[in-house]
Image (cartoon, helix red, strand yellow):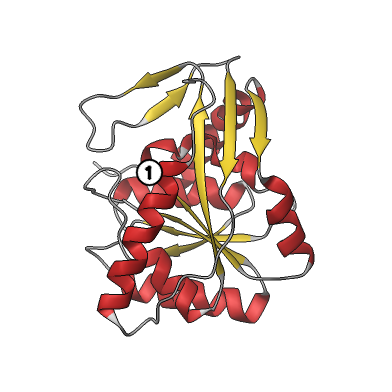
Amino acid sequence: MKISPSLVCPPLYTLYKLWCSTLRYSETGREAVDALWNQRTPMVFALWHDELFPLMHIKRQLDIVTVVSQSRDGEYLAGVLRRLGLRTARGSSSRGGVKALLQASRMMRNEGICGCVTVDGPRGPRHVVKEGALFLAARTPAQVVPVRIFMQRRKVFEKAWDQFQLPVPFSSVHIVFGEPYAPQATATDQNMLASAAAQLQTKLNSLKNPYHV
């Protein structure tokens, strides 16, 4: 039985806000992001699906549209994200993905906002970059910002395809922003998009976890 998002999303939103309010956040590399935002340079934030939970700390003054799956879970997630102040474009690699990316690119161009994509979602393979974020960046055009979200203490859901991570309340979270860059790709050249995806994967993997030094 499908439960209406209007019933599910408000308590999920409240729980999420309370949960995140207990976390201690720190950041590396935020200055470059804020400088680009102040210049109104478009950006696409690229992160792994399993590190999604503490995402809202990234937003602050930024105006962001994020691509969300058309699944039932995605419907609930989209409702929570909208309450948190993010815009949403609905679609995934398997259902309406190109349509959602085109919608997000129009919003970015017309409204001067940023994009955000979980680059291995919604079904994996885990930590393998798909081309959606690069397609979005090429359409805008925008700088790509690799982002890793590291949780000091966390619950890992081992049986989930992405091994989703949930930070333990009152623990620390460190967000690492990689150096923004302009990928060498066009939205219509599959070979260039594939090469750019491999480059982004390397950049994400190079961002170091400060809790595992």
Q: Where is residue 99 in the image (x, y as percent from the top left)?
A: 36, 76
Can residue 63 be spotted in the picture? yes
Q: Nearer the viewer, residue 107 or 114?
A: 114
Q: In this view, does 55 lie above or below 163?
A: below
Please give the name of the residue rendered at 41% of the width and 68% of the height, measured from the top-left corner: 134
Please give the name of the residue rendered at 53% of the width and 70% of the height, measured from the top-left corner: 182
What is the quadrant of the N terminus in the image? top left
In the displayed image of the protein, which residue is found farthest to the right?
Answer: 38
42 with respect to 11 (left or right) = right
Please give the name of the residue rendered at 60% of the width and 14% of the height, measured from the top-left corner: 170
Q: Where is residue 6 in the image (x, y as percent from the top left)?
A: 48, 46
101 with respect to 173 (left or right) = left
Q: Which amino acid does label 1 sit on?
A: His
Image mark count: 1
Can residue 91 be spotted in the picture? no
42 with respect to 150 (left or right) = right
| Residue at image mark 1 | 49
Q: Which of 55 and 137 is in front in this view?
A: 137
Q: Is mark 1 on a helix, strand or loop?
A: helix
